[in-house]
Image (tube, rainbow, N blue to C red):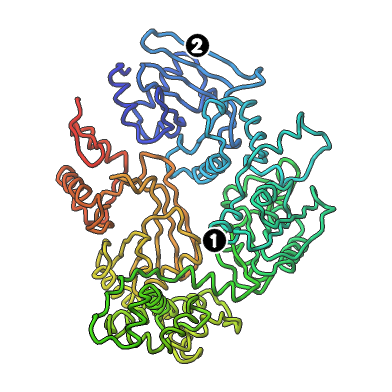
Amino acid sequence: MLTAAEFAQRVATLPFGKRLPEAIYLHRETLSRTDPGLSRFVEAVGQALKVAPDEWNLVKLGREQFRLSLLHYPDFFSDAYPTLRQSVTVDLSRLQHRVVIYDAQDNPPILHRKEQMLWPEHPSVPDFYLITQEGEAAGLYAEPRKIGFKQSWERLIAQHGYALVDGRLFRQSMLPQTDTATTIDRHKTALVRYQLSAPMKLLAKHGYLNGEFSVFDYGCGRGDDLRELQAHGIDALGWDPNFRPEAGKHASALVNLGYVINVIEDPIERVEALLGAWALCQTLLVVSAMLASDDFIAQFKPYGDGIITSRNTFQKYYNQSELRGFLERTLDEVPIAVAPGIFYLFKDKQAEQAFLSGRLRRQHGWHQLTQPNQHKLSKLQQAQQQTPELFEAFWQRCLDLGRLPIEEEFPDYPRLKELAGSPARVLHLLERQEGTDWLEQARQARSEDLSVYLALTLFDKRRPYRQLTEALKRDIKAFFGDYPSAMAHARELLFAIASPEQIEDACHSAHEQLPASLYYPGHSLLLHKQYLSQLPPLLRVYVGAACQLYGELDEIEVIKVHSQSGKVSLLGYDDFTQPIPYLVERIKIRMAEQEVDFFDYVDAPRRPPLLNKSYLLPTDHPDFAKQRALEQHLGKLFGLDLQQDLNLSRGEFEAVLSREGKMIKCFRIHVTNK
């Protein structure tokens, strides 16, 4: 038997489990794998109380008191939010226990965040984590006191406009009606403000919901997104076969086919829906569908190429590559991945080119103009002296383009021409004053931007459209002479990403030039995503191709370029502003196979700490000195070379700190009172 002190020590050092202030919850199997001694103690308590082995599968261990509870959730693995059938609470200090049976109760306790109660490698963890993420995205965990019991949880789900179907959250507006009953005070639900759906949020992020574009929501459900868009004055209409069948289908600049194709059981009708949405699209079609793992799908009844839910509705779950392939085959277009499960398809090819080139283009910061000499001013110099802001704006525009702008590319072109004559003479004057290096650097940078853009269009198997924007045509002519020459250069650049030797050389060069990076010769280069545009063109194509397979880098901070294995890793941290951020998400993109693998560190103790963050910060960062000093102290404490690729979990890291009587506050290491 364990003493109270031994019990408390073992509970405190458990690496896995759902931690609450007063207790830690974990599955019976997890406890036996993690701490066999503590597991034997808990099993002995159960045997002493004559609790049968099949009457409990979770244990609640007190963190501050010498007590535990044996909990029975019979549907732990099959239900998204399983209900509690029986609880045996044991006060070990008083040798008292209490049994509560919930079978007859209409509102039993339910369980959340199941992934935290299993060891990280358990095959159910990815699916459980996805369930938790859906709840967080829906805003269901904002008030934890409301989620502990079945009826309040179901009411909360409905209040947020969702329904639970086979453990997955769906917007009510996207589900077919199962009866004609209406809810009490139904009119009040119109006052609830729901967030925009994920595809609409991406449109807003990319500047498409600024009021310039009309929007049609194909399969709009009850119109959650439409209500919000119309409130912002956006020209938005929608149609849905269940909720708005009488509404017409209207051609619009933007068409959203949001989570529609995954609920259509007939493959032919699914194709027709996609083609119908594409026919209405004038500029951009957004298509999204739900993703799920094979293990999750396998638990349901198969039907066609999908499954049948408990509501007798159909769901076709995709993976990222499968969804991309379906879109490409059906529309004979190359989709652009903007997020997992969300793709853009442009009908307006000029808009597509503008989106892609703008997505990849560098942002340039250039120094202010110096003032010209005041003696012996020519007529052109006098005009410059009278209107310095005009000449400065023109110079900045030349640097931005890397070439002489035409009239449409510089708003004050007529005024400049009137005051100074030929804009080419103005540029010649400015080059003499500022030196040719600035413009040459701009030309080189813009040429590289264009090469990267064209190489990525080749990687994405995007056809060389004739509808290139006029600006791109001018750039191609200025920097490459003609389109075939530009494409030949881009093709050479793209093929080079298959060469480990050239990737390795580019990684070495990038490490020498970037403000901050970690470089492991012969293995990898790590950098913060803010420096992507400063990479050599070859690495920009390499990483850009990976991002075309994955999507936007909104939740990613660090990029890891593997120089020899043909992979790119994307690393997302819980809070990169903290001195010691912890890894919560890792995406591995295998370039040769064009496959994307997701790894989530849902268990907090398993998350690796970033102990060499200072090497990813520029030396002029305001926290650089404090960060580096902290890491040097940690290096001595742990006996580690922090420039190496470390393999340490949060649990191991915090265990060493605890053993040494240390704790981290801000950028300082403090001594704790043991």
Three-letter amino acid code at disc 2? Arg
Q: Nearer the viewer, residue 553 or 561?
A: 553
How busy is the neighbourhood of tag 2: few (under 14 within 10 Å), some, or many (20 plus)?
few
Residue at (33, 82) in percent of width and height: 382
Three-letter amino acid code at disc 1? His
Q: Nearer the viewer, residue 14 or 482?
A: 482
In the rendered view of the protein, which quadrant contains the C terminus? Answer: top left
Q: Nearer the viewer, residue 616 or 357?
A: 357
> In this rendering, would 444 be left or right of 327?
left
In this rendering, which labeled residue sits more in front, label 2 or label 1?
1
Q: Which residue is mark 2?
A: 98
> In this rendering, would 331 be left or right of 517?
right
In the rendered view of the protein, which quadrant contains the N terminus? Answer: top left
The alpha-carbon separation of the residues under discs 2 and 1 comes to 57 Å
* Residue 662 visible, this angle: yes
**Circle 1 SS class:** loop
- Where residue 266 sits, quadrant-wise, is bottom right
Q: Where residue 629 sits: x, y (%)?
A: 17, 47
Residue at (45, 18) in percent of width and height: 46
- Count of numbered labels shown in the rendering: 2
Q: Where residue 566 sits: x, y (%)?
A: 39, 69
Asked if marks 2 and 1 touch (Cβ < 8 Å), the reply is: no
How busy is the neighbourhood of tag 1: few (under 14 within 10 Å), some, or many (20 plus)?
few
Q: Which residue is mark 1?
A: 206
> In this rendering, would 245 be left or right of 173?
right
- Where residue 468 sits, quadrant-wise, is bottom right
Above or below for 306 versus 455: above
Q: Nearer the viewer, residue 423 or 199?
A: 423
Above or below for 316 versus 192: below
Of all residues, the one furthest to the left in this rendering is: 636
Q: Where residue 68 sits: x, y (%)?
A: 42, 19
**Who comes first in sequence, dot 2 or dot 1?**
2
